[in-house]
Amino acid sequence: MLDKWLVAVQFLLAAVGVYQFALSLAGIYKKKNHKQYKPEKTFAVLVAAHNEEAVIGALMENLKELEYPKEMYDVFVICDNCSDGTADIVRSHGWNACERHNLNQRGKGFAIEWMLKKLWEMPRQYDAVIMLDADNLTSPDFLSEMNNDLCSGARVIQGYIDTKNPEDSWITSAYGVTYWYCNRLWQNSRSNMNMANFLGGTGMCFESKLLKEMGWGATSLVEDLEFTARCVKNGVYPAFNYRARVFDEKPLTFKASARQRLRWMQGHFTVARRYFFPLLWQSIKERNLIKFDMALYSVTVYTVLLTLLLTVFMWVDTVMFNGPNFPTLFEYLPMWVPIVSVAATCVAFVLALVLEGVRSWKVYLSLVTFPIYLLSWYPITFWAFFTQNNKVWSHTKHTRVVRLDEVQGKQAS
């Protein structure tokens, strides 16, 4: 009986991998037609910040340069439990510094919920809310692109999350490769297939009416994934705007990266517990592929964990007990299948870089160490499983001050 269960789990994991790979192929094509609208929507730009005096000034300057009527958007920086000069820098640029002090409810999700309540009480109301992080920079047409999508009927929109410091270290390059891959072969593929896209924590746009109807309520360690799941469960499918770029600072060291990814995985377990079965049941009942896809994505953290456990079990059985003493998937497949699957995965990452026009030789050279980054997800996920009840927000310190012209200059070279 155990043998049958082990084979069944292996086939299930393989089927999930084939599904994701097949879907990613739809992202190779990039749509060219994009309807343009005159500026119509007003925006409240919310920036979550905790002790960000090192980088907040660059974003404040950047937001002044947006190619959108200045009277149609305002910036509100949530100075969440700050003990530095973040608020003073924001005010010096003429934007709104909203100071929040609550040591019991710490984290981005709580800060956003607090700010939204204040926003709904203000005399001026906005058509939509933009959410950014303090270390970000946005493309000049960011609000124009969000206006286009809102006018086209979208209610939740995710912009293209790019990396502003991919050449700083091998770990920032690994982040860059991952995000270029996800933007092109995950987000763009789902956009082409008219499926729900995944929110990425920054570069997000929400129709104000929707936020008032649903409430924020996303206070887990991965508020973006949590709100995505809530949207899809309620029949609201986030869109992806390939042209609206937001440049995000990535951690410089492996230690900082591991800490950040541990928080992501801890929160991912929480979302999987809350939403996997409701979404799966809805997808079956309604015969809805979009909800099935979201259910599958929500439980990705468990597929990673199962893959790790099966691999460790197989190696222990082989080394210590002269195994394999249980059937493996490879016994039912030709030898060329695993070889082709590994090769296809490698090619997919390179293909994403080529399609996205990445020219940096340092990034391509970093593909040598990229497998270390990928493999490190396994122990991080394993540890996250045993610490998933942790609700303490771990702040990622940002220090890399880069202006938009520097980022765009490097990408063009």
Image (cartoon, grey):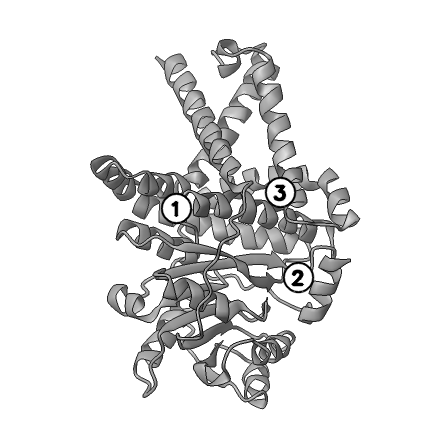
Q: Which residue is disc 2 drawn over? A: 164
Q: Position of residue 48 (x, y in %)?
A: 49, 71
81 shown above or below 386: below
Q: How crowded is mark 3: few (under 14 residues within 10 Å), some or many (20 or more)?
A: many
Residue toward you, 51 or 293: 293
Which amino acid is tagged 3?
Ala
Q: Dot 1 lies on which element?
A: loop
> Residue sitting at 38 percent across and 14 percent down?
4
Q: Position of residue 320 (x, y in %)?
A: 59, 15
Q: Where is residue 125 in the image (x, y as percent from the top left)?
A: 33, 81
Q: Where is residue 63 in the image (x, y as percent from the top left)?
A: 56, 77
Which amino acid is tagged 1?
Asn
Q: Please state which of the two labelled residues, at mark 3 or mark 2, is closer to the viewer.
A: 3
Residue 402 seen: no
85 shown above or below 256: below
Q: How crowded is mark 1: few (under 14 residues within 10 Å), some or many (20 or more)?
A: some
236 shown above or below 407: above
- Left/right of residue 406 with respect to residue 90 in the rendered view: right
Q: In which quarter of the image is residue 298?
A: top left
- Left/right of residue 163 with respect to residue 278 in the rendered view: right
The tag earlier along the polypeptide, 1 or 3, is: 1
Q: Which residue is disc 3 drawn over? A: 352
The tag earlier along the polypeptide, 1 or 2, is: 2
- How much space separates mark 1 and mark 2, taking CA atoms? 29 Å
Q: Which residue is disc 1 drawn over? A: 194
